[in-house]
Amino acid sequence: MAVIPARFAATRFPGKPLVPILGVPMVVHVAARAREADCFHQVAVATDDERIAGAARAAGVSVIMTGDARNGTERVAQAAAVLEADVVVNVQGDEPALPPENLAIVTRYLMAHPECPMATLALPADERDLADPNVVKVVCGADGRALYFSRAAIPYPRAAIPGLARRHVGVYGYQRSALLQLVAWPECELERAEGLEQLRALHHGMGIQVLEAAGDSVAVDIPEDIPRAEEALRRLKGGGEWQPSTSS
């Protein structure tokens, strides 16, 4: 199951899920990317806002109304708690040009490895990524599981080792039971210090498998990001005029 958490009252960009991207609400684009992954029995928007719910329903997207949530993970967990699904994927609601294959990679891995509680994605990082605290870095063990995520440069580049540095790509997949356990745990000090929810899982001993992403995406954090997202969507669609899918 794919769940797209969406709230209206974002601090930096209120109403962001409804902002038009090539004339279509962003949340509808994101739902279309999830459908194109062709690996979910259900794609749903989880929200507490009737305006977002209305836009999703008008495009034929399922909606799960939630209560208050401190973050997207909690909102996805509220949806998962009332639905039947072995694997739940948290689909970022601000990436209208998200490569559908990224979602398929995470979903297929978790379905094939039910013993793995959680999975996410990464891509190689360059020097600019390492220096940017807005880009989250990850280091992994020999088995591909995350050792740590940080906004700092990890591993410290004392020696140049090509391909060692990796940047996190924010797609999260969970076994349903693992997701419900994760949100039941209290926040930890590392999570608060870095501002990274995934550190709660590592703090409590929950393994996170890090897989290679198929491609990158463009997040819309502020209005100035919209032209970049629209250009990324045009490239994803081969330059043609995009039309939303209405299939479920």
Image (cartoon, grey):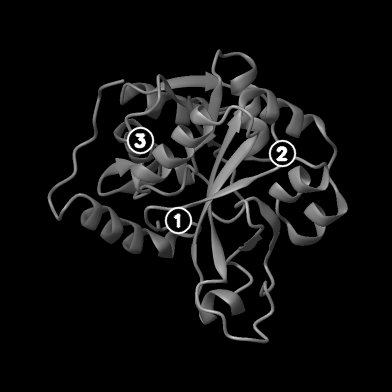
Task: Tell me the element at label 2.
Answer: loop
33 sits left or right of 212 in the view: left
Residue under label 3? 28
Badge 3: how crowded within 10 Å, few (<14), some, or many (20+)? many
Between the residue at mark 1 and the residue at mark 2, the CA separation in whole angstroms equals 20 Å
Residue under label 2? 70
Q: Position of residue 104 (x, y in %)?
A: 40, 37
Q: Position of residue 48 (x, y in %)?
A: 58, 27
- Image quadrant assignment for residue 179: top right
Q: Could you say which is closer to the camera, residue 117 or residue 100?
A: 117
The image shows a total of numbered marks equal to 3
Q: Residue at x 24, y 34 (%)?
A: 244
Amino acid type at image mark 2: Arg
Amino acid type at image mark 1: Val
Amino acid type at image mark 3: Val
Task: Tell me the element at label 3.
Answer: helix
Q: Earlier in the sequence, mark 1 or mark 3?
A: 3
Badge 1: how crowded within 10 Å, few (<14), some, or many (20+)? many
Q: Position of residue 110 (x, y in %)?
A: 53, 32
Q: Residue at x 50, y 25 (%)?
A: 50
Between the residue at mark 3 and the residue at mark 2, the CA separation in whole angstroms equals 23 Å
Q: Could you say which is closer to the camera, residue 4 or residue 213?
A: 213
Q: Could you say which is closer to the camera, residue 113 or residue 208?
A: 113
Q: Could you say which is closer to the camera, residue 106 or residue 21?
A: 106
Picture disc at residue 220: 1
Task: Tell me the element at label 1.
Answer: loop
Badge 2: how crowded within 10 Å, few (<14), some, or many (20+)? few
Between the residue at mark 1 and the residue at mark 3, the CA separation in whole angstroms equals 14 Å
